[in-house]
């Protein structure tokens, strides 16, 4: 069976001059519209790769939204998993910011504004090939300022954050004078176009034109698309194919990356080279992290070497008033570090520290970095909620992989350590810093080595996957009563032919 895969490299450059669209330097002084919609170029080439009967399709129309003199900023939040998402737009009136509720139906999930764009694709004869709608959130990695007088930095997150089913709150935005990429392919099905020439027309839907002040002459973009068969480095594509898994959430989640990682890319994440001396006491009060476990998700069965396993994704997030910052200091000549938790006052000044267990080097494929041993624990409990199986995954490299709730106070919208390459170190380092910022979660996806439960000989029945943060309570927190989350599962069948039922939790089936 052939499957189509969308790959995003090499199609259109992300940095825009945009002079061809009339939004260039010469117009920087003119009053821009609140929002405009442009295509970076009028012609693109889309490449198809046939690899072992599977089609990989590289498609990028180069569509962008540009904010005017004020940012586009939207806050979306739900007060509970069984509650609807409420979205508000931040507007500036008389020099002051205020939040205005968006009309019902515009935001139904955490993927952005629903049905923001309609895209139609016609063939060379003008016949309709496909038509679909795409959402828009504004947050994107490749954004840049499009005029000289735009602000120097962009405060908004780099992804929408809708891939975790237990997300609570998101912030989406386009900085004033900056661009943001617009999604250009359908989200619910594989997308492919045969070799040939096409015309893609993308239009911002009327309700958003009116709401966001997009001029009618800047609400539609037309791009000529040439689809070609292309060659690709077979080794590179094989690696891409091997890395794919149905549970993988987003490209930026590098918890799926293997190989040694070096914590040299972000200076702010380098730990000092020696232990705190003298060790400052833990402050009696002040900001603290608050580690909260989310229910296990993306739960599935697997079989390997005649044994049955339950795989799962697990997220622990920080809902506190301070980042969780843990530095590890290597015991010379060993593969073990002593870990210390650091504390900060309301102004961000370091005011104390305390021992917090250890970090250890994990040499397994799929890891090859330093793991903090006292962050979380995964247990499979029986129907009476007594321990049945403990996961072999008992140590963690902390990284801000998921935006769980960016609407809480002091949430870090653009954390530095979003993957293993920025936080977990190689085997040649003497110290490591691992951070979980406010509002962010650390997710380990379901097929991480050592994370599953072996259930080969486990009796059929009801069980609970427990995600337990701070199991030994070596970390100081605001609250430890929310450290455990349970997700019910029901096992059936026979060894080698097990069955799995996962009832919804809070109405969520993910």
Image: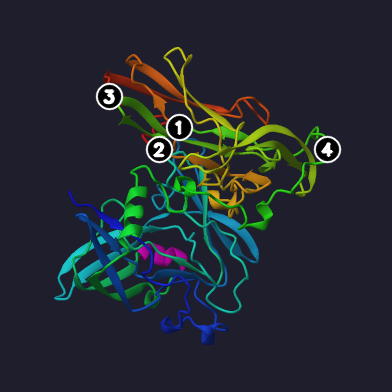
Residue at label 4?
A: 280
Q: Secondary structure at mark 3?
A: strand
The image position of residue 409, as x and y in percent, is: 64, 46
Q: Earlier in the sequence, mark 4 or mark 3?
A: 4
Specify the segment rendered in magenta. 206-213
Label 4 SS:
loop
Q: Which residue is mark 2?
A: 447
Residue 502 in view (yes/no)? no
176 on left or right of 107: right
Say whether disc 1 or disc 3 marks the residue closer to the N-terminus.
1
**How far apart in space, not on screen, are marks 1 and 3 (Cα)?**
19 Å
Q: How far is mark 4 from mark 3, CA to CA?
A: 53 Å
In terms of secondary structure, where does tag 1 sit? loop
Q: Residue furthest bottom?
A: 26
Please tell me which of labels 2 and 4 falls first in the chain.
4
Up the image or down, 275 lies above or below 236; here it is above
Residue sitting farthest toward the top: 384
- Across and down, in percent, residue 101 comes to 50, 52
Q: Which residue is mark 3?
A: 499
Relative to residue 277, is residue 134 drawn left or right?
left
Q: Pointers 1 and 2 in contact (CB under 8 A)?
A: yes
Crowd class of label 4 (few under 14; some 14 to 19; many from 20; radius 10 Å) = some
Circle 2 crowding by C-alpha within 10 Å: few under 14, some 14–19, many from 20: many
Give the quarter of the image for residue 200: bottom left
């Amino acid at each position: 069976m052939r499957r189509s895969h969308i790959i995003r490299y090499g199609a259109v450059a992300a940095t825009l001059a945009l002079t061809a669209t009339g939004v260039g330097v010469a117009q920087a002084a003119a009053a821009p519209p609140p929002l405009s919609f442009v295509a970076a170029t009028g012609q693109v080439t889309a490449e198809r790769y046939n690899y072992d009967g599977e089609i990989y399709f590289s498609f990028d129309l180069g569509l962008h939204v540009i904010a005017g003199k004020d940012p586009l900023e939207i806050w979306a939040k739900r007060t509970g998993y069984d509650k609807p998402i409420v979205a508000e737009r931040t507007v500036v009136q008389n020099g002051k910011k205020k939040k205005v509720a968006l009309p019902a139906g515009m935001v139904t999930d955490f993927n952005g504004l629903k049905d923001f764009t309609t895209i139609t694709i016609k063939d060379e004869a003008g016949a309709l090939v496909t038509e679909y709608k795409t959402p828009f959130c504004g947050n994107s990695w490749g954004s840049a300022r499009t005029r000289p007088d735009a602000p120097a930095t962009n405060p908004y997150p780099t992804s929408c954050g809708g891939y975790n089913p237990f997300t609570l709150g998101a912030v989406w935005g386009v900085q004033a004078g900056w661009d943001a990429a617009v999604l250009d392919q359908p989200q619910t099905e594989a997308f492919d176009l045969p070799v040939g020439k096409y015309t893609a027309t993308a239009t911002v839907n009327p309700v958003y034109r009116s709401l966001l002040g997009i001029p009618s002459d800047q609400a539609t973009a037309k791009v000529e698309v040439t689809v070609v068969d292309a060659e690709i480095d077979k080794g590179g594509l094989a690696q891409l194919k091997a890395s794919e898994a149905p549970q993988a959430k987003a490209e930026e989640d590098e918890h799926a990356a293997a190989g040694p990682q070096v914590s040299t890319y972000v200076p702010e994440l380098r730990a000092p080279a020696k232990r705190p001396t003298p060790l400052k006491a833990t402050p009696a009060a002040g900001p603290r992290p608050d580690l909260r476990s989310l229910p296990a998700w993306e739960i599935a069965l697997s079989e390997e070497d005649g044994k049955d396993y339950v795989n799962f994704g697990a997220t622990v997030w920080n809902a506190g008033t301070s980042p969780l910052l843990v530095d590890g200091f290597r015991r010379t000549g060993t593969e073990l570090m002593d870990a210390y938790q650091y504390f900060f006052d309301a102004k961000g000044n370091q005011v104390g520290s305390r021992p917090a267990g250890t970090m250890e080097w994990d040499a397994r494929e799929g890891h090859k970095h330093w793991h903090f041993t006292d962050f979380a624990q995964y247990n499979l409990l029986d129907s009476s909620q007594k321990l049945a199986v403990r996961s072999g995954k008992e140590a963690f490299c902390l990284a801000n992989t998921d935006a769980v709730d960016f609407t809480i106070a002091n949430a870090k919208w653009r954390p530095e350590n979003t993957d293993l390459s920025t936080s977990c170190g190689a085997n040649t380092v003497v110290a490591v810093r691992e951070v979980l910022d406010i509002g962010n979660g650390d997710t380990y996806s379901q097929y991480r080595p050592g994370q599953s439960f072996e259930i080969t000989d486990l009796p059929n029945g009801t069980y609970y996957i427990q995600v337990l943060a701070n199991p030994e309570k070596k970390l100081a927190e605001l609250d430890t009563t929310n450290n455990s989350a349970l997700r019910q599962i029901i096992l059936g069948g026979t060894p080698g032919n097990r069955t799995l039922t996962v009832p919804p939790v809070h109405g969520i089936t993910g």
